[in-house]
Image: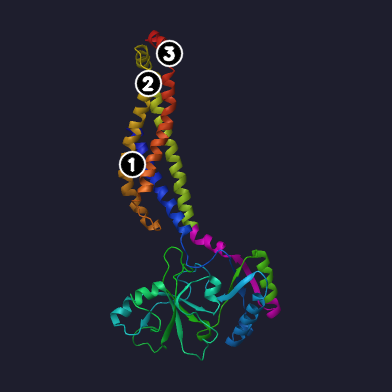
Amino acid sequence: MLVVTQVALAVAVVAAAGLLTRSLERLQGTDMGLAHERLVLAELDVPVEPFDDRERRRQFLDAVLERLSTIPGIDGVTPINSEPFSGAPGWDVPRFTAEGQTADQVAANPSLNFEAVHPTYFSTLGVSILRGRGFTAADRDVAPRVAIVDDAMASRTWPGQDPIGRRLKFGGLDSRNEWLTVVGLVATTRYRELATPRPTLYVPAEQLMITAGRLAIRTAATPAFVAGAVRDAVRTVAPDVRVLRVSPYAEYLRGPLALPRFNALLLGAFATAALLMSSIGLYGVMAASVRERHAEIGVRLALGATTTAVARLVLGEGLRLAFFGAMMGLTLAFTVTRVLRGLLFQIEPLDPVSLFGAAAILVAAALVATYLPAWYATRVDPVEALRAE
């Protein structure tokens, strides 16, 4: 009974570890909606003076971008406001109104990630423009107010309709903010949040504010080369501006993956310990059983039983215990894994691969644990066993 219970608990723990591991694999392999493999981000420390003036900040950024874009190996540069995976603490729009919406529809609108971007933003980050156009140098402060929405926002605000040409504004129905005309539709990205991305609204930085403190750089060169190039360009344009950090995009990705990796590693360690303990327990029970049945096995061999039949007898009893434990463990896992729902990404708590895979692993471990006692049983000398009896 103890061994069966031990196997059952091990199945539940191994199934939970399998769920978290498969969830982590899917999270790591999810499509982020942007080409991040060759992205490097540089963080700048831009002093308030003399760059509090909008025009001076724009001139500084334009000059840095011009210098960096001429360097061989750098395929694109754009200023950005929010660092990757900054989540809700970044810029956001808690409320907006689409033209023609009722008060109830406005209240149901989702909260948005908000990005003020430059014309090179989408090409540098590799965000696909699905329809319409991206921003251009003509989308300046004196031009009509425009916006670009992502697929997630468009499908919720204008389901089944073309968002190009539609208008929206910040705030509720009575808001006096200017209407923004949608000129482009882009793919939904996981730039701000990895697991559960929010819809995103983009506006030209020239029409809002130019406050970018970071540069995103698409390059095939090493981060060290990019760091030197950025520092040289910034130092040439504005010696007072410091480059604080130059890091590949992959370093930012470690943050949102840290907790899922820790959870999978921790539960994996528990699963390994549970698997080892259940195997040792089953081995101990079967070894004791073979010792107690030493004389019986000798009689069986003396009466003509083959060593294969004796081994099959011991293995069958061990696997029977493991099978009962696995069935109990699956029943327990159906309940336990539901608790992990909030930790899973694109995988259900009752994932058959994880559940039945855990049961199969325990049965395989039981087979290995029972093999040695079964082998020992085939080595019993019937003459010695009968003489001892």
The quadrant in which residue 104 appears is bottom left
Pick the quarter of the image with the C terminus.
top left
Which mark lies nearer to you, 3 or 2?
A: 2
Q: Nearer the viewer, residue 52 or 253?
A: 253
Q: Amino acid at mark 3?
A: Asp
Q: Secondary structure at mark 3?
A: loop
Please state the horizontal and vertical placement of residue 137, each as a whole percent of the image.
Answer: 55, 85
Name the residue furthest bottom. Answer: 142
Mark yes or no: residue 81 visible.
no
Q: Nearer the viewer, residue 235 or 183?
A: 183
Q: Mark 1 or mark 2, which is nearer the start of the sequence? A: 2
Please state the horizontal and vertical placement of residue 358, each as a whole percent of the image.
Answer: 39, 43
The residue wearing badge 2 is 310
Residue 329: numbered disc: 1
> Going 43% across and 28% down the picture, which residue do you hit?
371
Q: Secondary structure at mark 2?
A: helix
The residue wearing badge 3 is 381
